[in-house]
Image (cartoon, rainbow, N blue to C red):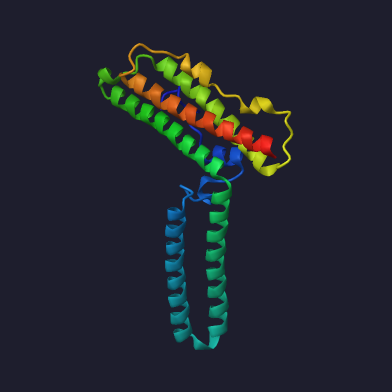
Amino acid sequence: MRSDIQGLEITAGELKRLSGTGSDRVYRPATATKFVREGVKTFGLIILVLISCLLLVMIFPRAYLVWLVIHLMAIAGLIFEDIWKIRCSHQNKHLINLFDDVDRYNGIIRAIAINDQIEDAGNAGVKITDRSKVIQALDLIRNDLVRALKTERIIRENQKFVGTNSELFATNLVALNALQISDRASEQGRLLNQALQVAVGVQAEMKKLQQRKEAT
């Protein structure tokens, strides 16, 4: 990975630090269909746990009470985790949307890294000519994503959030739109267009967060 894109990607550790939770602690997407699918998976695991309990009781009948307690605790843990994830997913749809924006943003960086490898292999035709503008756009979007994640966490953890942090709701969309390039059909044009789509998504979530804050 070239030096100009190193450090731009939002890692899983940084994402957890900014949001206060991992992206694996919620179901994505937060839809009824997803919840049902995860419920079916949990039900399947419970069946396996029950089969395991039955086999152990048959092999070690004297310790049946121990096996029963252990497996019932495991089943309770599976059910509790499922319910907790569904509840968190339902209550934090803004956060899930931001997680999706981060994935899209990181995807652009990975696409650039792969493009660089192809170029380094001797394919000069894939070179990103307006690379500095693409990197500048990604840097602006990264700042927006970090601000959005911090803002969402503040509002989530402080329902009585005071209105003294209005600057948190600002975005860099205007600055991003100013990064015009000559050929929108080129690779750099495609990357900038993807970056702008992520920026628009972040701005939409910021507006929703602001409305949520004002409603509290």
Q: Quadrant of the C terminus?
A: top right
Residue 51 rendering spot, x and y as whole percentages: 43, 77
Residue 154 visible, this angle: no
Quadrant in which the N terminus is drawn = top left
54 relative to 164, above or below: below
Q: Nearer the viewer, residue 113 or 3?
A: 113
Which residue is pictured at 49% across the width and 85% down the height? 60
- In percent of the image, x 52 and y 60: which residue is there? 82
From this view, report whether residue 191 is shown above or below residue 11: above
Instruction: Name the residue located 56 percent from the left edge and 37 percent from the top edge.
Output: 14
Q: Is residue 150 above or below residue 55?
A: above
Horizontal and vertical percent for residue 198? 46, 29
- Front one among 128 and 191: 191
Residue at the spot 46% in from the left edge and 72% down from the top edge: 49
- Examine the rendered structure and indicate whether residue 103 appears above or below residue 63: above
Callout count:
0
Q: Position of residue 154 (x, y in %)?
A: 67, 38
Q: Residue furthest front?
A: 215
Q: Specify whether residue 68 is in view.
A: yes
| Residue found farthest to the top | 182
Residue sitting farthest toward the bottom: 62
Q: Quick check: 83 left or right of 37? A: right
